[in-house]
Image (cartoon, helix red, strand yellow):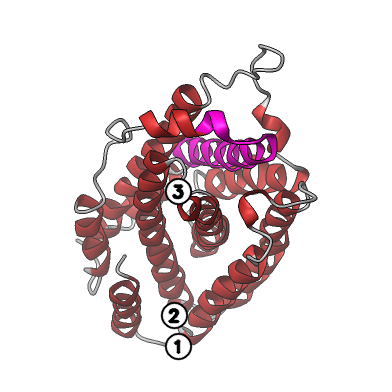
Amino acid sequence: MPHASSTLPLRLYAKAKSPGVWNPRDFDLTQDILDWQWLNDNERDLVLRLTSMFQAGAETITHELSPLITVIAAEGRREEETYLTTCLADETKHADFFRRLLNEVVRGGIDPSTGKPLDLTRYHTANYRALFYEALPRALRRLRTDASPAAQAQAAVTYHLIGAGVLAETGYHAYLAALEKNGLLPGACKAIHGLQQDEARHVAYGVYLLARLVAADDRLWQAVEAKANELLPLALGIIGDACASYAAPPFGLRRVNFAGDANARFQKRLARLARARGQTLDAIVRATRAVIEQDDV
């Protein structure tokens, strides 16, 4: 039997169907291909850096998310299970789009100066590898043998709060600040707006899930806070690695404080989770719904 007071995930599911359904193959990249030819080396490098990290991250989540869906389904939370299937579809869709961007705009990821395939893993710094090669798969795979609320909370912190809430949102902001504000790669920018809405739903569900877990067992708060503070330096480190790679930031981005903005969003969400301690599930649903409506998720 489905759990009570769990209609909020169905609200997210409805939004995932419309306007959340979009086809990565439908975006016109004709102008993007032309624009790419005029980008300088640093500008191309930044686009490749962001694309590589997002494409690899989306593929990782696509391969690793199913244990969370299984655990939620086993608890009889049908509405949450229904919504989580859209997260899996979203991540697959994101990986598909970034692969298309690499194949069609960057022309197969070939380095024009050498004629050899670009090694995009060079953009995967130690911080990136620690989070996406190690922490994220480990947290989600743990759910195969440990379905405890503590394991669920650690998975949600890693995927929803850090992966989506810090890195994905910051990266999409960087894409648009670099490209849309300069009138470049319009097809990619249009897709990024769709990806932003997808990730906003992912974060909203993750905060709801964590708030539900913390409200049900106050002892989980300490574990949630510890895991979040453990992983935040990795996420901010990834942002810092990217910024430090350019003496002169491409696309005139020097005035944008990406790390500061990301940390502010993180702290705001962590504070919301702290307030969930001792609340009823209905109160959590109302609070999360208010955020969804305010952010137009």
Q: Image quadrant for the C terminus?
A: bottom left
Q: CA distance from mark 2 to mark 1?
A: 5 Å
* Magenta stretch, main secondary structure class: helix
Q: Earlier in the sequence, mark 2 or mark 1?
A: 2
Query: 10 Å neighbourhood of mark 2: few (<14), some, or many (≥20)?
Result: many
Relative to 206, is 283 on the left or the right? Answer: left
Within 10 angstroms of label 1, few (less than 14), some, or many (20 or more) residues?
some
For image coordinates 66% across by 66% down, the residue present is 255
Q: The residue under label 3 is which amino acid type?
A: Gly
Say which label, 3 or 1, has the lower sequence index. Answer: 3
Residue 271: quadrant of the picture: bottom right
Question: What is the total number of numbered labels drawn onto the structure image?
Answer: 3
| Residue labelled with disc 2 | 215
Report the amino acid beneath label 2. Ala
What's the magenta region?
36-64
Residue 183 versus residue 16: which sits nearer the camera?
183
Picture coordinates of residue 49, whole percent (x, y): 63, 39
Residue under numbered circle 1: 278
Amino acid type, residue under disc 1 in the picture:
Gly
Query: Badge 3 is on which residue?
Result: 183
